Image: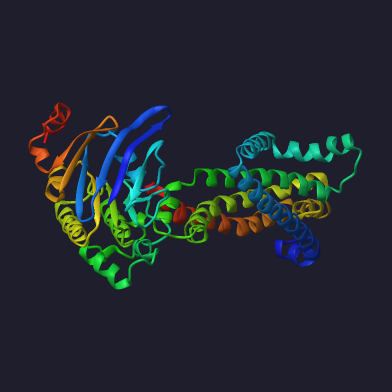
Amino acid sequence: MSVLGILVNYYPTLLGGLLVSVELFLSVSVLGIVLGAGFGVLGARNPTAGAVVKTASFIVAGIPLLVLLFWFYYPFQSLLGILISPFLTAVLTLAIVNIAAIAELVRGVLTDFPKQYIVAAQMAGLSSNDIFRRIQFPMIFRQIIPSVLTTQLFILQATLFASLISVPEIFRVAQNLNAVLYRPVEIYTTLAIFFMLVLAPLYYLAYVLRERFTRDFSER
Amino acid sequence: MLTAHNIGKKRDGRLILNSIDISIEPSSIVSLIGPSGAGKTTLLNVLSGVDAPDSGEVRVDDKVLSHPSPRVAMVFQQLFLWPHLTLWQNITLAKLSTKDEIAELVAALGMEAFIDRYPNQTSLGQRQRAAVARAIALKPKYLLLDEITSALDIEQIERVAALLEKLRASGVGILLVSHLINFAKRVSDHIVFMDGGAVIERGDKKLISNPQEQRTKEFLKFF
């Protein structure tokens, strides 16, 4: 069976897996960006919260994602005597990684923001509201967006690990399909091309944004 | 008048400014000269309300200055042009001058060719002129300039000198930090020599050719 044949005959199965992947990614991404930004702002404003954010991000970065996923899937649930679905376990694990990464990113950018840009705006007689709207927000947004995008692309790739705890996402579906058809070349090549078509332009976008925006700070 | 009385400032336990008294009258240009690390930039930061002094106070026309305001505009040594705005947007953001007034300023500083570029697309000399224009566009009563000529060629320095003289004639009081002694001599009414966080000597521009204090003589002997 050709690649096209597999796509035509099994597209409902593949689409089902893709939808689970998208649902998993969006849940983790929204949780990570919203809570991560919140913790990051808190960490920049309060030194104690800042130390907590920094420590948490070091700890999370120090544990391989797969170990963390399996730890939440087996020991964590067994220790607490609870049962969480594989999908929610994957959301929980990836969200923790994403929240820690975004929080540290936001904290760092806010803490390192050169105060003199704000002083120059105060000197120009701008109101606090205008300083945030015209100076701080656009500068911080431009500096942070490429890194946030890169982190989300890493998370998107990491959703494939959820297949190892039986979440029926795209990779798991592809594995199951291969178990039935035994067409590894066609199936995994299709999967690789699919991910490349989705991820490569997004990585390129992150690269372009980084080139365009972050070099603005080069005259510091 | 912009006056600072008994200004003291410490940083990391080190005395940076020691009992400084200085004043800038309207329609005058004062040049602050001295070796690197003398405390000139710190003094400008205090005089502009950017940094609070540990002792003493700064008054602008008898009102205590407690925060940065357009009344006392400063051009920072590192400029701090907002990098996401073009030079024109940097200069016009405050909306304290009309577009015609700013266009005139841009022409006086010879900036027409690069005014729509972003700071990172321009040379240091072009950015220095933009930062000067941004400060002048605030219509300040007092203007503090920290090393604004370090990357300018002689033609541009002459343009800046002419502009400063025009501002002085319109009533603006200017305090200038410069390592270009000729430039300081050319435009200034008064010279203040600083070293080790203290004012060593002050006087009119004759001070440059005829210093009285030993430390001033040592510094100016290379000139």
Q: Which residue occupies the foreground of this view, B24 or B70?
A: B24
Question: Considering the image in quadrants, where does the C terminus of chain B appear?
Answer: top left
Q: Is residue A204 left or right of residue A102?
A: left
Q: Is residue A8 left or right of residue B29?
A: right
User: Which picture quadrant has residue A55?
Assistant: top right
Whole-percent x and y of residue A35?
69, 50
Residue farthest to the front? B62
Q: Is residue B71 left or right of residue A212?
A: left
Q: Which residue occupies the foreground of this view, A77 or B98?
A: B98
Residue farthest to the right? A81
Q: Residue at x 84, y 54 (%)?
A: A180
Q: Which residue occupies the foreground of this view, A172 or B108?
A: B108
Whole-percent x and y of residue B83?
41, 55
Q: Is residue A49 left or right of residue B214?
A: right
Q: Which residue occupies the foreground of this view, B125 or A182?
A: B125
Whole-percent x and y of residue B121?
34, 57
> Can you see residue A174?
yes
Marks counted in the figure total 0
How is the model colour-coded? rainbow
User: Which picture quadrant has residue B170?
Assistant: bottom left
Q: Is residue A73 above or below residue A203?
A: above
Whole-percent x and y of residue B33?
21, 39
> Can you see residue B123?
no
